[in-house]
Amino acid sequence: MSYTVLGTGIVGRTLAAKLASLGHDVVIGTRDPAATLARTEPDGMGNPPFKHWHAEHGQVRLAPFAQAAAEGATIVNATAGGQSIEVLRAAGARNLSGKVLIDVANPLDFSAGMPPRLDPVDTDSLGERIQRTFPDALVVKTLNTMNCLVMVDPARVPGEHTVFVSGDDTGAKKEVTALLGSFGWPESSVIDLGDISSARGAEMVLPLWLRLYGTLGHGDFNFHVQGARPRA
């Protein structure tokens, strides 16, 4: 399979590295590859500049948004939520049409300081906005309720825990569920919340996640829904 990961931050890097390790062809999309590779300072989270990561993951290609999106059979949105629509527009609606678009982003608004608030929230979600803006894409919201290291290695958290999927297309959700399985998520841990409007609930988990992160001092935790199988 070929995957395009949009976003060069720690989430995009982590997902791209995992996909490449599984033998997939992976390209990361960025606005300006030369500028991305020229950065020498750590990012806002203290992570090393992208070029250091890229030097260790040479099999992952770097390309402008539109070129990257055209190349991938499946798209992963790992951008900052407040920039996701803009980035996806730069990627090009034609390049997203008919493709599964895995949205792992959260619409965090830092304009009023910490902790960030969600925008949109409650009556809308980033997942829905992406689906409305790109109606020919098959948007599936997942993995946004956990640290990126847990996304690709659920065994970091002992015991059973849960990952959610939301989306309008059943086939797309099955494809994403299979990908989650290759990451190490057992099928019993995956809960299909329903159509893309259910992304509202998944995104609203983030304020609680952020408070837990502040209390625990690390991101190696997740949520487990006990008795999660639907009743016959």
Image (cartoon, rainbow, N blue to C red):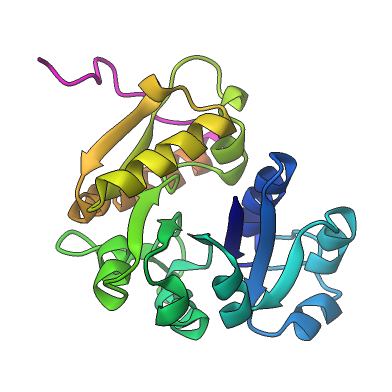
In the rendered image, which quarter contains the C terminus?
A: top left
Res 123 seen here = yes
Task: Name the outermost residue toward the left.
Answer: 232
Instruction: Give the dominant element type of the magenta stretch: helix, strand or loop.
Output: loop
In this view, 207 is above or below 109? above
Left or right, 8 with respect to 110, comes to: right
Left or right, 31 with respect to 223, comes to: right
Residue ID at (83%, 61%): 54
Left or right, 101 with respect to 65, comes to: left
In the rendering, at what x and y percent does residue 219 appear? 57, 38
Residue ID at (89%, 60%): 55
| Image quarter of residue 59 | bottom right
In the rendering, at what x and y percent does residue 48 appear? 81, 61
Left or right, 201 with respect to 188, comes to: left
Q: Which residues are magenta?
A: 215-232
In this view, 127 is above or below 96? above
In this view, 29 is above or below 73? below
Q: Is residue 205 a member of the stretch shown in magenta?
A: no
| Image quarter of residue 88 | bottom left
In the image shown, does 20 or 31 lie closer to the viewer?
A: 20
